Structures are given as structure tokens and as C-alpha cells.
Amino acid sequence: MKLTAALLLITSVVFAQAPEVPDKMQFAGITLTIRDDARREIQKDVNMLTQSAKHHNIKVERAKTYFPIIEKIFAEEHVPDDFKYLVLQESALIADAVSVSNAVGFWQFKDFTAVEMGLRVDKEIDERMNIVSATRGAARYIKKNNYYFNNWVYALQAYQMGAGGTMKAVKDYQSGTRHMTITAETYWYVKKFLAHKVAFEGYVTGPGEVKVYTISNRSKRSMKEIAEEFSIEETQLRDYNKWVRKDHVPDDKLYMLSIPTRGESGKRNDAIARAEAANPLEQPTRVNAEPARAGNITMMLHGLPAMKAMSGETPSAFAKRADVNLSSFLRYNDISVSDRLRAGEFYYLKRKKSRGPVSHHVVIAGDDLWSISQQYGVQLRRLERYNKIDRADRLKEGAIIYLTNKRTVQSEPEVEEAVEIESGDTFNWTVQPEAKPVPDVPSIQPLPQQTIEVQPGVTSIDTMATDTISFQQHVVVAGETLYSIAKRYQLAVMQLVEWNNLSLSEGIKPGQVLQLKQSSDPIREPETMEITHTVKASDTLYSIAREYGVTIKELMDWNKKKDFSLSVGEKLTIVKKR
């Protein structure tokens, strides 16, 4: 008892003095000078994050368990290691964390953002709760943002407010800078991140109490079978693989399972060793089968393989190093054999695409049409055609360069849907107030007819009420994605998928008619019934909401809950439609 008391005293003494925010910090290769006004704000958050030794240590242990996996994936994806602290800010490394706006998982993705990043989200599988899949998706999202700014600080800011929102908020991107100043005016999300880095950086080294091995699964198997193979309890397997929402892991693609081990059993057993040897963790695509060398590593840009040019390198030397045909390499990158390659610039090893990942680009200082073509992976001749200009034309700063053949009426980039965030010492669901732009919806006046003729890109209209318009159908036009259509009508991607029996792997085609409502039947006020749920030890608000098909917010409202804490035996009221 005396020893325990002594340890508690030591712990309380350690946390009585929170880590101190320095006046200079390193982040993603950038030296940050922290002004006093910002340092006081960040210190306040650090104090809050560390004031409870118990809560701080819980997060530290989770970080020690999951950081080795995150670090490996970030290294493979060429994302700075410092971004691993963002997962603590987003979800406190709670796999099934859900925000009030239905952002889910380790990295707090909304469903349509997750699908855009290549994750599967449906009633059977939710990869937002898979540490490997979600982290790789987060890495891709972070890199996507950095393509716009060439500045990891603004890529971080864009994780919360979208690239378009950051473009509007920031006047000078300081592209490629190695030094920045953090002030009281710096975006709150960036300062909150720096607080998490300071609060945890000195505590997350060394092994954790639980070690997780990631094992690939290629065949359809039940969770019970997998648990037996690796000699662990099925309940424990499910606790670390909440992304599996049914009894089986499907075989439609490769999934990474988390196999937890603890204490002396933390060493790999024979089953884990065999599984790792047979199915190593997914690696990025490389050009050669040779071992990777510095400067010879291929990364994927907009779905295309690309490599960085070295200082003084000629096109012929680059093509030889990349093991691609010289004439093809020149054609892929819209250059001639006499051109000097720009050191540090990425060059493509396959033909660029006919349209960009976004509708348009806002010109910044130093841009030319070729650099924009390379930035977005779009063929130069397409950009010339879409914008009726020549590659030699000088671009005016602030001008719009269209990346598709479908011009929009907006004069600024559309604001991407923000990835929802959660932060705090305990995982509270109070999202920092930030106005979110509402996607533009075409202005259509009510007509006397019941419906209008369906044309490509135009919806039919239900005019049962003269003061409201509810969209029923949308005809797909070239260049549209499920994401863009869902955003236009303020729907979830998975709603479109379910209402139209779509296959995410097959996508959509021009001319296809999509239903924008689950049913055309008149809406009737449903009858309701109340159900009482008694909380079990394994319950979370998310698992209960999933069990009854309701939202977290509804559970909190019905039961007047201020946070997501639950007590065993607690009675929760669930209101269900009959």
C-alpha cells in the first residue's frame, strides 16, 4: 500500500508541471517560431491535456500501441512523422469515436470523404475504424492538401477546413518555406495540434502494454475462425477490429486485421509469424523490383506513379533511372529532350489524365500552365483547350484555370467538406464553432406541372407544395462523381449507393439516372415506441446506436447526456419508429 501511494505521489508530482511550450518548434521540417501570445494559448491547452495523469496515460498507452503502425504507413506514403499526433487530437485513438456530425473512426472521416480516399463504408465494413486503412486514407488526404500549398502547416489546416477553405483564409501560402511564425492569429486547429505534440511527444517512446500485429486477410472467414487461428478470445479480436460490422471478414479486397498481444505473449506466435510472412503489409508501388534507393522511390500522385528529379538531371538520365522509354517519358510530362528537369519536382511515369481531381485552380505567384498540369496530373493540351490559352501565356495571379471541360460559375475554388475534429483532455463532442459553407444548389423555380422532362444533369421536381422543392432524380453527366452529386444535394454518398443499388467498384456512367429519394411515397409521420437498453461493460454509445439504427446525437438528446461516458447497468431510452 505504501509503495502504491508513493507511486501515485510521484505521478502527481510529474504532472504538476506540464511540459513547457518552447519558443521554437520543429514540425514536418519547418522551424516554427512561437510568439508569446500564441505560446500562452498553446500552453493552456497543454496544461489541460496533462492535468489528469490517468487520462493522459490512457492516451499515451494507446499511442504506444498504434504509433508503430502509423509511423510505418506515413513513412511508406512520404507523410511527415509529426502528423501522427493529429490522430490523438482527432479521436484520442478511439476506434469507434463518432462526432455529432457523424464523422467516424481513428481519423474522423465522414462517409463520402472516406469513400473518396478509397475506404469501404457500408453496413458490413467500415474501414474508418481500421487503423491501417484509415491511416493510409488520412495520409492520402494530407498529401492531397499539400499538393495545393507545398506547405505542411497549411496541409494540416486544410485537414479540418478543406483545401478550398484554407485557400480563402490564407493570403500567402509561403510555398516550400522552412520557417514560419505562429501567432495568436494562427488558425486555432494548428495551435491545438501543436499543444498535442508538446503534451505527448516526450511520453510515447518505448513499447506499450499492448502490441498490435497487422495481418492481412484475403479469404472470407468468420471472426470466430480468425480468433481460433491466432489463439485469442473472439471478444478481444472484435475489440481491436470494430470495422468488421458483421460476423465475417469478406474477400472482396485485402483487409488488415489487428491482432493484439499483451505482456510476455506480446511476442509473435507461430500463427502471426506465418501470416506476416505470407502477406506483408501493403507497400507503395515501385518502378523496379530492385531494393529502393534514395531518390529512386516512386509515389502515387493522383493515381499515377511519379518520381522526383535530382539536381542537374536530364530527361534521358531520369528515364534511364526510372526504367521507362525516353520518348514516352517526354510525352507523359509534356517536355522535350533538351529541357532541364526541375530538381525536386515530381515527373510522371504514365500518361497524365484528361481532367483534374478538382474543377479548377487559383493561380499563385510562380505558376505557369505546365506547373499546374504537373501539380494535378492533367495533360497540358487539355488545359490549353479548357482555358483557350497557350502554355507560353503568362498567368495572372488570382486567375482561374479550369481543370475539366465543365466550367463552373464560381470564381473561387469550392470549399471541400471538412474532416470533422474532436479534441480535449477527455473526448468531448463539442466541435469548435466554425461556419461551414453550404454547397450551391441550382436555382429552380416551381413549375405548374408535376415534373419536368429529365435532361442530362437536370433533376425532375416534385411540386406537391409550392413553397418547397424536393429533388427526385439526377441524370449523370460526364465528369461527375458520386461525391460531387452527393455534395450538390446535401446527401451522404452511401445514401446514393443504397437507394440506387450501386457498386462502388463499378462507379457511375454518363446518362445514368440516380434516385435522390428513398421512396416517392408521401411522407407520413411515423409512429414511435420507446425501448429501454441496459448498458453492458462492452457497450459504447456508438455500438448502442449501431445496434438500434439511431445516431449518437439522438441517444444523447433522448437521455440528456453531456458526454459519451456510460455506467454498467445504466438505463438508456431509445425511441424507435414502428
Image: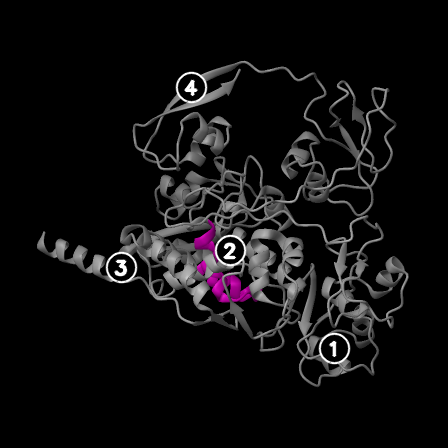
Q: Which residue corresponds to mark 3?
A: 15
Mark 1, secondary structure of its residue: helix
In percent of width and height, residue 314 lies at: 75, 83
Q: How far is the residue under mark 4 from the one under mark 3?
A: 44 Å
In percent of width and height, residue 255 lies at: 53, 49
Q: Which residue corresponds to mark 4?
A: 531
Query: Mark 4 against mark 3, which lies toward the viewer?
Result: 3
Q: Residues within 10 Å of mark 1 (few under 14, many from 20)?
A: some
4 or 3: tag closer to the N-terminus: 3
In percent of width and height, residue 31 lies at: 50, 74
Query: Mark 3 against mark 1, which lies toward the viewer?
Result: 3
Q: How far is the residue under mark 2 from the one under mark 4?
A: 39 Å
Identity, as a three-letter code, of the amino acid under mark 1: Ala
The picture quadrant where one finds residue 571 is top left
Above/below status of 496 relative to 133: above
Q: Residues within 10 Å of mark 2 (few under 14, many from 20)?
A: some
Q: For this view, does 18 lie left or right of residue 298?
A: left
Q: How far is the residue under mark 3 from the one under mark 2?
A: 24 Å
Q: Depth check: 232 or 370 in front?
A: 370
Identity, as a three-letter code, of the amino acid under mark 3: Phe
Where are the magenta residues, as a range? 68-90
Q: How far is the residue under mark 1 from the one under mark 2?
A: 42 Å
Q: Which residue corresponds to mark 2?
A: 189
In the rendered structure, find residue 319 and report the number of the disc placed on it: 1
In percent of width and height, residue 223 lies at: 44, 40
